[in-house]
Structure formats: C-alpha cells, structure tokens
Amino acid sequence: MEIIISNFFSNNSIFLAVAALLITALGCVFGTLFTVRSKAKFSGGFCCSCKGNSGTFHTTAYLNGVITGLEDNSRSGEEEMVEKVAAVVPPEKQSGASMMEQLVPEITTHALSYLDYPSLCRLSMTNSQMRKAANDDNAWKALYHKDFTLEQDSVIPVNGWKAYYAATRAIVNINNEFFRIIKERSLAEMGHFWLNADYVKCFHASGESFTGYSAVMQSWQLAFNWEQGFNFQVQDVRARVLTDMAWVAMKAYVDMETGPFNVTNIFEFHNGRWYMVHHHTSVMMVNGGAEQQMMQG
Amino acid sequence: MIVLNSSDGATFEVEESVAVQSQTIKHMIEDNCADTSIPLPNVNGVTLARVLEYIKKHAEAKDDEEGLKSFDAEFVKVDQASLFEIILAANYLDIKGLLDLTCQTVADQIKDLTVEEVRAIFNIMNDFTPEEEAKLRNDHAWAFE
C-alpha cells in the first residue's frame, strides 16, 4: 500500500484528491491490515482512518489535547501511532502530540505527584508544554511537603515553590556537608565553610561560646584534636530559606545513649554561595568519663 | 447485574458488587440512572474490557495481597497508548486503585531515564532551541548532583 501511495505522489498530483477518496474507502475495508508506522510529525501524512466507529471522537470533548488514531491502536492492538488524512480530520489532530500532552490537566497533576524531583525536572526539560505542566506550583508544593516538612504550608515563596524546593534542597545538602566536615575533622574545610566575619558565633556542646571567625576556628581546631571524629546521624531537619539567609533546626544523634543534640545552624548568602554564620548545639550531659565528648560540636 | 455500554457500542455485563469499585458507576446506580444500562461514552470497548478485568480480579481476590500484586504487575505490561487509555478510563470511572497503579507505572518508567529517553518513550517532540536547552540544563543542575 505504501508503494502505491508514493507512486501516486510522484506521478500525478491531479489525481491526489481522487486517490485520497479511493484509498480512504479501501482503507476503511482493509484498515487493520495497512496501518502505517509513523514517528515523524509531517503534515499530509497518508493513511487510513475510519470516521464512523471510533470512540475517541467522543473523548475529545473532555480531553484538551490532540489524539492521533488511538482507536486504531486498540483495534489492531499494535503499538503504532497512526496519522490522520488531512482532508478528513481537522488540522489540529495532525500534530502527533505525545500521549503525555493528551492527558487532561487534573490527571497530569495527579500523575506528576508520583514523580521524584529529578524526574520532574527531567520532564520539564523535554519540551515547552511539559515544562509548563512540570513547573506547576502545586506539584512542587506537594513534593516539598513530601520530601521536607509539612510545615510552611501557608508560606508563599516569592519565586514559587519549585525555586523554594531547589533552595531548600541546596541548604539541606550544605547542612549535611557541615556534619561530614566534623566527621572527617578537616579544619581547612571548616575554615572554608564559615563566613570570615567578626559577628559569627559558635556554641559548642560543652556550653562554651565563641564569637568572631578566628575564635570560632580555634575552637574547632581544639575540638578536632581529640581522637575521634564524630559520626552524627541527623534527623528532623527543618529548613527555612529566605533570599540571603537560611536557618536549619535539627536533631543530631551520636549513638544510642547520647542525645539527641538540638542543633541550630544559620547561613548567609554571599558572592554566589552559602556560608555558615552561626552554630548552636544543646549542651552535652556530663556522664562520668565522657568529658572528652564535651568539646565536640 | 449491571450492563455497561462502551463508546463504540460494545456491551459488558458485570455484577453490581464489582462495578461499584468505580465511584462514577456507583453514583449512577445510586441516582437511579442505571435501570437498563449505563452508557460510558468516554471509554472504548477494548479499554473497558481491560478495566473490568482489573476490577473483577480485585473483587474476587480481595484479601490475596501477593496474588493481587503479581496481577497488577502483569496488568500494566502493555504498550504506552493502552496504558494512557487505561489512565483516562480510570480517571473517568473514578477507580482510585487503578489510577494509582497506572500513574505509578508511568512515574517508575520516567524515574531512571535521561531527558532524551523520556522524550523517546512518550513521543514528546523537543521544541527548545539549543540555547534554551543549555539554559534549562544549567537551571536544573541542582537536581542532578
């Protein structure tokens, strides 16, 4: 069938209309046998479609997108997208829109709620229509509540929930960095991590407090000189992120008996990155020979 | 027994106790719209048959969790077009379990793919310029560390 069609095209365009009618009529009879595999989105694609029997013309009433030959798929059960003949079908049905784009908005929103944040981002990079759907503010708000906290429900982020999710993700990662640096006892990294300013403050579990970059760094040097690096398990992380400032509350556990330490970290945004400006941990309970733990964060 | 008519004229009989898994059908029955048969103009015959397969299995094997799980896994092994038809039907008929299952299936498909692979599997046409694409990749760097 395909060979016959291309011959018509190359030989004589006058017979095109007649050919269209003829082939459509034949197509209705032999439709299931001659479905055309087509991935391209060119218009004027030639194939068979029977107008009368399909249910999808009814479903367009409640779909806000475009369908291409889905009824032929279900009839023949084959995995092929069938193009419509230009003369028979309105032009908008020829765009070959993806199946994702054919879902009504509320299903799309519902389907999006099953995705994690990388998948949602990936989807928004596929094309402009998907970007609009995947950037839906409510989808990101729901994802925020799922991944982070149910708090801040009445907050209206200035740049929308997607940006707020991204900023929160960034701050939570940076907060985790802080505990990694403590575990590895890396003074150099701790020096890089804090803002070099005179108003930064650090309150250690010993109950001692230090103000100003130099004093804070000295306190960390002392703390890291003890033998062990502490492996903190951090839970219940609650972050609040504003444009230039963020604070994070959390519970830090060292082992089964100790803790939790209630920790508050505050960050400021300068020169394109976040810096720690404040660290406060609740005081360690003194337990006999646990003196050496007192100096740790 | 309830009689259901698909959009393309196919007729299906199903027990009322099974059919009411669809909230849409349940409400139609309660509102007395179901004396002779229920017309479902938004679902074609093939899809309706599959949906009925699902609700029949979930009615009869209600307590067999393992059995239902393997049934569900096999049930969603269909081509993309059919899967989307089932999603639309599950939404129209308001069958929560089926909608959750099918949406989760689509989500799982997307989960480990690259952007290009997502486009391919769902037949999405890229309409971004290379500059726009580069900017988007930049903007989303935070998500792919």
Image (spheres, rainbow, N blue to C red):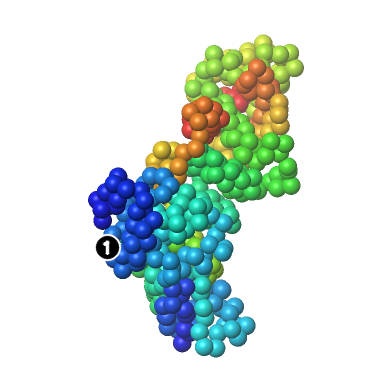
Nearest the eye: A206 or A209: A209
Nearest the eye: A50 or A87: A87
Image coordinates of residue A259 in percent, x first then y, are 60, 38
Residue sticking out furthest to the top? A214
Image coordinates of residue B91 in percent, x first then y, are 53, 64
Q: Quadrant of residue A26?
A: bottom left
Q: What residue is shown at x 52% (from left), y 26% (from top)?
A: B131
Q: Secondary structure at mark 1?
A: helix
Image coordinates of residue A217 in percent, x first then y, are 63, 14
Image coordinates of residue B61 in percent, x first then y, are 39, 75
Q: What residue is shown at x 47% (from left), y 61% (from top)?
A: B87
Nearest the eye: A9 or A249: A9
Nearest the eye: B126 or A108: B126
Q: Which residue is mark 1?
A: A33
Neighbours of disc 1 within 10 Å: few (<14), some (14-19), many (20+): few
Placement of A225 over or under B131, stated as above or below: above
Horizontal side, residue A213 vs residue A73: left or right: right
Placement of A26 over or under A95, stated as above or below: below
